[in-house]
Image (spheres, rainbow, N blue to C red):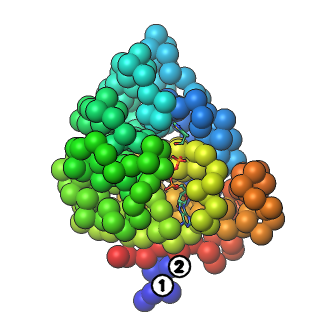
Amino acid sequence: MEDETKNNWGSTAWAHLSSTRQHSPLIQCITNFVSMDFMANTLLAAGASPAMLHSLQEIPDFTPNINALCINIGTLTADWLPAMKMAAEVAVKAGKPWVLDPVAAGASKFRLEACIELVKLKPCVIRGNGSEILALFRASVGSTKGVDSMHDSTDAIEAAKSLAEASGCIVAVSGAVDIVTDGKRVVGARNGVAMLQKITATGCSVTALIAAFVAVDPVHAFEATATALSIFGVAAEMAIDLSKGPASLRMHLIDSLYGLDHSTVLKRVNITSL
Ligand SMILES: Nc1ncnc2c1ncn2[C@@H]1O[C@H](COP(=O)(O)OP(=O)(O)OP(=O)(O)O)[C@@H](O)[C@H]1O
Ligand SMILES: Cc1ncsc1CCO
Ligand SMILES: [Mg+2]
């Protein structure tokens, strides 16, 4: 049974990656300045088409034509928030899924309130680290070291389930085990390497990959979220043996994601029910 489940997830992950390569979904990213380059390159390596457009003036023309939207509040300022909200609203109206990355949600009242307002605009998926998901669930400031987590992902399982129930979103918590829940089902993806935490914006980039996988399989957002996290982790596992440290891991991660093949995906994807 264990093996069968693993194989099914491997096939599903391969289907999502293949479909992304085949259809090259257009992913609009309104993201922080730190992550823009790595996020765009992650999407390209997976076969998607990134567009880092964030101007309020062009959202009405552009956003209805995307396949999915990724909103990340990493370097949030007051003047960016209206564009984020408008893009989310336009995407929902056009029937396009959008994904929220609540970076450092507990770092300030301003950030937390922005996240809470964005969650009301019906993201399909929320992906954060343990501290971010706990801050959102508790709606309270504190318990975070800036953009880095002070918690294991497993500390936030109950918070993630409650947040998913309350918001109607899929909630993912990244960490050594990536947790994905719709409020009822919970799975853990055990791919990845610890050194991913030493490269900035790996979390941001995997959130964008979730947007790409949800774009190609919108009716299975739960599965697409789990497979995106797993595939990113598998690429890191392939890359680590070629790397001398974070900088070369970053480079090899992009190459590995680009070159991932069927047998490696089937062999390595490690997603199980929790
Ligand atoms: N201990 C670990 N072992 C294996 N993989 C890990 C570990 N910690 C994090 N990861 C992986 O690293 C990636 C980033 O997750 P992380 O939780 O560090 O996100 P984040 O804090 O939002 O990052 P950032 O804000 O820098 O973008 C994910 O793919 C996750 O699975
Ligand atoms: C380091 C950093 N600061 C704001 S956003 C960001 C990227 C990782 O979240
Ligand atoms: Mg983050």
- Identify the mark at residue 126; answer none if there is no mark: none
Q: Is residue 158 visible?
A: yes
Judge by depth and name the residue closer to the eye, 257 or 49.
257
Provide residue 213's location: percent of width, then percent of height.
51, 51
Q: Is residue 89 above or below residue 261?
A: above
Please state if 110 lies on the left or on the right of 241 as rendered: left
* Mark 2 to mark 1 CA distance (whole Å): 5 Å
Residue under the point 39% across and 49% down: 144
Provide residue 189's location: percent of width, then percent of height.
48, 69
Looking at the image, which residue sits at the far bottom? 1
Q: Badge 1: few (under 14), some or many (20 or more) residues near its Cα, within 10 Å?
A: few
The image quadrant where one finds the C terminus is bottom left
List the residue tagged with mark 2. 7
Residue under the point 46% across and 59% down: 174
Judge by depth and name the residue closer to the eye, 48 or 121.
121
Looking at the image, which residue sits at the far top? 57
Amino acid carrying mark 2 in the image: Asn
Judge by depth and name the residue closer to the eye, 200 or 160.
200
List the residue tagged with mark 1. 4
Q: Where, by quadrant of the figure, is residue 267 drawn?
A: bottom right
The image quadrant where one finds the N terminus is bottom left
Q: Secondary structure at mark 1?
A: helix
Residue under the point 74% across and 63% down: 239
Q: Is residue 214 visible?
A: no
> Are discs 2 and 1 less than 8 Å apart at CB?
yes
Residue under the point 30% across and 53% down: 134
